[in-house]
Image (spheres, rainbow, N blue to C red):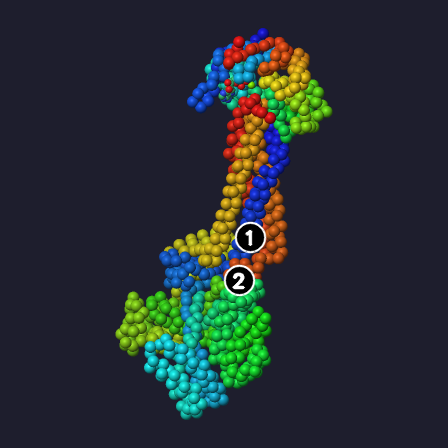
Amino acid sequence: MSSFFLAIRLALRNVAAHAIKNLVVGVILCFGTIVVVSGSALLNSLDVAMRRSITTSVTGDLQVYDKTARDQLSMLGDMNFGGSDNGEIPDYKVVKDALAGTPEVAEVLPMGIGNATVFGANDIDRTLEDLRAAVRSGDTARQTTLVERLQRICTDIRPELDRVEAITNDKEKLTEDRANLDRVIAPAFAAEFTTDPMGTIDWMDGHIASLATDGRLAYFRLLGTDLPAFARTFPRFEITKGGPVPEGERGIVLNESMVEQWLKHPIAREFDWFQKEFTQNGGAIGTSGTVFDRVARMSRQYRRILYQLDSEEAAVLTPLLQAEVGSQETDLVALLKSFLTVTDENFAQRKAFFYAQIAPKIRLYDINVGDTLPLRAFTKSGYLKSLNLKVYGVYRYKGVTNDDSAAGAYCLVDMPSFRDLYGKMTDDQRAELADIKSSVGAKEVDPSASIEDQLFGGGGAVETTVSEITTLENLDSMTFGRVEDRVQHTFTQDQIENGLATNVAVILKDPAQGKAGLTAVQAALDKAGLNLQVIDWRAASGLVGQAATVVQLVLFVAVGVLFLVAMVIINNALVMATLERTSEIGTMRAVGAQRGFVTLMFVLETMFVGVGSGVVGVGIAAALISWLHGVGIPAGNDFLSILFGGKAMYPVMEAFDVALGLGLVTLVSTIATIYPAVLASSVPPVVALQGKE
Amino acid sequence: MPAIVELNNVVKEYPLGKLVVTALHDVSIAITKGEFTAIAGPSGSGKTTILNMIGCMDVPTTGTVKIDGTLTNNLDDHALTTLRLNRIGFIFQSFNLVNVLDVRQNVEFPLLLQGKLSSKDRKLRVEEMVEKVGLTKQMTQRPNELSGGQRQRVAIARALVTNPAIVLADEPTANLDSTTGHAIIELMRDLNANDHTTFIFSTHDPKVMERATRLIMVADGKVV
Ligand SMILES: Nc1ncnc2c1ncn2[C@@H]1O[C@H](COP(=O)(O)OP(=O)(O)O)[C@@H](O)[C@H]1O
Ligand SMILES: [Mg+2]
């Protein structure tokens, strides 16, 4: 025992005696400890924040889906961007019933993941649509301004055709287009219009509309669910515009990030993007680079404003723009171009003017609450289906800023609408379809045939009562609100629950007991003979969950490398120390110290350095984490705010992190000492007699 | 009186690459308790090798070594170390003190390894030994603060603190000037006379040899 204390005393003395060497080793170990402790604290805090955020946003604690699915279910972004095959659950009710007796389960929710697109109308389409309405309601004043708007658009398009002349071979079509535009631009056109309004509109629909730039194609990630139950179950769900879809009715609630990213007016989005670039990344327009190029491009986009202005609005805007750009110019095109020429000096002013004066006069969003969306989707059976859904509101996840990421940016639809777009029919619908087919003599559609065959082949379109199978002709002319609706508009809770889902969210009574819950749910499903699998929220979150795993892996590798380097350095330093101290070790051995004593002395020496620097490292890490806890780690973008569950993360350090850091640093220093200690203990006592001082 | 050290037909060979260096050729020595023995001979004659054999630092290639009745040939490293700790004291040519320990701690070192005495007894024993070598005033100094002679006195105190049966000293005066060296030999001689501790030391200094009660001359690995 006294020899143990002697070894401690010697080890401590040696730590002091070889201060420089131990300082180098200590700094490395200290740094390693800081990385381990703060890294572990950050990861654990992130994990807690992520769980809180993700499970209460969209995934729930567990997700159930088809065991035979080709792809892993990933709800927050996946590699296949919507093309993944998550299999299907033929009847949600069966799953619900199977889990009814599981005490761990608090709530289950049907979900259906799908995609749809919406073609935005172009500016002529939209104006013609408005004009039609004005004709129907007999509002002649409105008709006049709209015709004037069309004339302005055509005047603007006219010179474009000269440019087209150089690149087209179809001179005949070009001549025709010019003649058509000239007809509209001509002052006599207004009178012409009044003689046959509807006929003129149809003519313009066929001859002019295609000349304007195309409307944008918006891509929707859809999540079908029991909407009222979803709102109740996910506390982070928050309607920011409009309201929820009324219970038992069809409808869609858009995601705020998606709206901002895909549906906002392009010029507004450019202003927003510059603003973000300046405030977040401290950028400036400058004289070259990405921002400069984008700014330069903006003035060429004046049409995006021009085509949406009525003559009255144009008249109001002209003097305002003159004042804003400081010019006497009367041509609106020139004024808009010079307004959109933005510099570092005038940026703030221009942005404010845009939102105050221009935004109210144009369509700031392609789609607004109250619109009816003509959603189109390729169903699982290969049909191209369209379904009109009313937009009831816009939602976001509480605490998540709208930014440029679309993680979890699902647009929520009711379950029956999801099923319609998904393309699986209920037995009732199948029966009804058979009925109609026999009555109209429609051709049976072979699901294995290609879409083209179905669309072109056999002549005549196939219709279903569920929605319309779009033929190529009406696909072209489709605009908002023009798809005839034949769908059943209301439904019961049974209709929500009886039928297909792609996945099921499970909320546990105790989210902390995720593993036990998962096992219980899987057991219940297996017992019911369902070929379904259960994954936890982390796996279900897909890329987001994987991102966290990647961060973990990177940290793991970094710590590994750091400690490997530390081990090599400690090992070298100690081997050198052993060689330097051969005579002293030999003397101790000669005088009666056992091999084990020498080993112990060396191991203790590095352990003291290790523990010492570990403690210092823990102290520094604690200071760092508590500082970060105070100021918060800001979530720079939407993706991070989903992970953090808010605008910032406030990390905390726990006993586990400290234990991990100290444990690792002790382990590493001990392992690094094994070889030198063995080397030292094999110094023979005879060297004492050969020793030179 | 039985011999406390007994070497019988000891041969020690060192492998040196492909060659074998024979450091000792058939050496037989018997030393009785209480003797003050000098092993003398020119450099390279085998003095240190003989002390290694006696000091249980190494075992002979052939022949036997018996220390205080114990045959060393078949002992393992642990047993040899224990034997050294309890029966033998060492004094080295280069003093070989532990630099990070002060005088008291250096002297205390073997007692702590033994772990036999209580800390109070240990303190008394250390103080007694340090006083015997005349270094009471230097008790808390480190080796690098002492002169060569003082360091060798610390080494003597360390060698004797456990009351060993035999004290071995390999050229204890070789690194000292002749006056200091002489004083060291006198100190050892006094301790031998008073406590009847067996001293065996090597030297090639004729003046030092004179002080021995017994002289063993070696040359080319043989006793002559
Ligand atoms: N470890 C060893 N390896 C090889 N040869 C050695 C070793 N130790 C001693 N010798 C050789 O043995 C002989 C005796 O050496 P040593 O006992 O040190 O002599 P001395 O102490 O009398 O000067 C010398 O020739 C020396 O070179
Ligand atoms: Mg020698």
Per the image, the residue denoted by label 2 is: A637
Kindly give the residue lying farthest to the top in the view shown: B1
Note whether residue A56 is visible: no
Q: Quadrant of the N terminus of chain A?
A: top right
Answer with the quarter of the image where residue B83 lies.
Answer: top right
Eyeballing the image, is A586 above or below A158?
above
Residue depicted at 71% across the width and 23% down the height: B136
Amino acid type at image mark 1: Leu
Host chain of mark 2: A
Host chain of mark 1: A
Position of A618 with respect to A412 (left or right) is: right
Image mark for residue A141: none
Residue depicted at 67% across the width and 21% down the height: B149
Q: Is mark 1 within 8 Å of ligand 1?
A: no
3D distance between C-alphas at marks 1 and 2? 18 Å
What is the x, y in percent for residue B176?
A: 64, 20
The secondary element bearing badge 2 is classed as: loop
The answer to whether tags 1 and 2 share a subunit is: yes
Eyeballing the image, is A504 above or below A10?
below
Position of B124 with respect to A227 (left or right) is: right
Q: Residues within 10 Å of mark 2 (few under 14, many from 20)?
A: some
Residue depicted at 60% across the width and 26% down the height: A693
